[in-house]
Image (tube, helix red, strand yellow):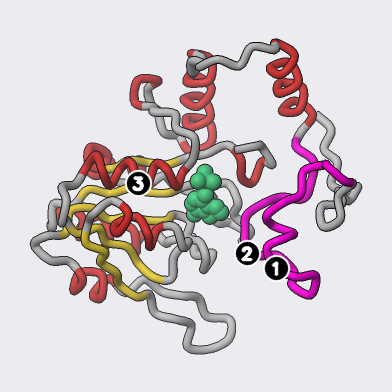
Amino acid sequence: MEFDFATPVERRHPEQGTWPSQKWHRYDASVLPLWVADMDFRSPPAVIEALRARVDHGVYGYGMVPDSLRRTLCEWSASEYGWEIEPTWQLWLPGVVPALHLASLALTEPGDGVLTITPIYPPFLKVAERTGRLPQRAAMVPPQASGEQWRLDIEALEAAITPRTRLLLWCHPHNPTGRVWRHEELAALAELVERHDLLLVSDELHCDLLLDEGVTHRPLAAAFPELAARTITLWAPPRPSIWPD
Ligand SMILES: Cc1ncc(COP(=O)(O)O)c(C=O)c1O
């Protein structure tokens, strides 16, 4: 498959009527819009062709998730991460952010605590409030010197847990710090989640966008099988593969 990472696509000043973008229009021209994971390259040809074929069909009624799509996800999970998953485990939704909200509604009761760490991809911070749950937060430790990374403060996370805490919204790898969590950090997290009998939503949208050499991603539920029964893993095709949502 040929990828074109050389031809710029004009999105700040698109021709009239051609798809103005939130990315390039939310702020004025002096701002370089790094605020959103929205690619400026064209999607891969196979994606464009598949969409074209779908559009050419001309009937856009309620569709089904094809078995082939479920199987493809199983194969990808096994080949990329050595994690054997089943088609029946999958629930296909229109987005990761809707999935965060749905998980809160499905797994917790009104007034339950929904915990997350900060900083975090901003929509996480609205989930508890929007679903009538109690927002709970624990701060990460900022870098103390240049070249250092943000750190998970496991003590602060534990201190934020109360008897009302039911759900932890986790981001792995972490947006916005770019942290790819180390196994020891995740092991401490897994122990905490089990000990406090929490449920876990692991947003793994950025799992294949790893920039540091030698770094690998391991789905949380695969790395800690004892967590699998209390974990919802969120995956999405769009980023960084430049697919449409
Ligand atoms: C960590 C994370 N989760 C979710 C999203 C958004 O996902 P969606 O558009 O599928 O709701 C983003 C977008 O940048 C993100 O960085």
Give, as a single range, the part of the protein colored magenta: 16-43
Residue at the (8%, 62%) spot, across then down: 163
Marking on residue 27:
1
| Quarter of image, res 27 | bottom right
> Is there any visible trace of residue 35 in the rendered image?
yes
| Foreground pick, 56 / 71 | 56
Name the residue tied to disc 2: 35
Q: Secondary structure at mark 3?
A: helix
Q: Residues within 10 Å of mark 1 (few under 14, many from 20)?
A: few
Q: Name which of mark 2 and mark 3 comes first in the sequence.
A: 2
Does the residue at mark 2 contact the one at mark 1 (Cβ under 8 Å)? yes
Q: Name which of mark 2 and mark 1 comes first in the sequence.
A: 1
Q: Position of residue 121 (x, y in %)?
A: 48, 61
| Foreground pick, 193 / 133 | 133
Q: What's the CA distance linking mark 2 and mark 3?
A: 22 Å
Marking on residue 101:
3
Q: From the image, which quarter does the C terminus lie in? A: top right
Q: Is residue 8 above or below residue 106?
A: below
Q: Secondary structure at mark 2?
A: loop
> Is there any visible trace of residue 216 in the rendered image?
no
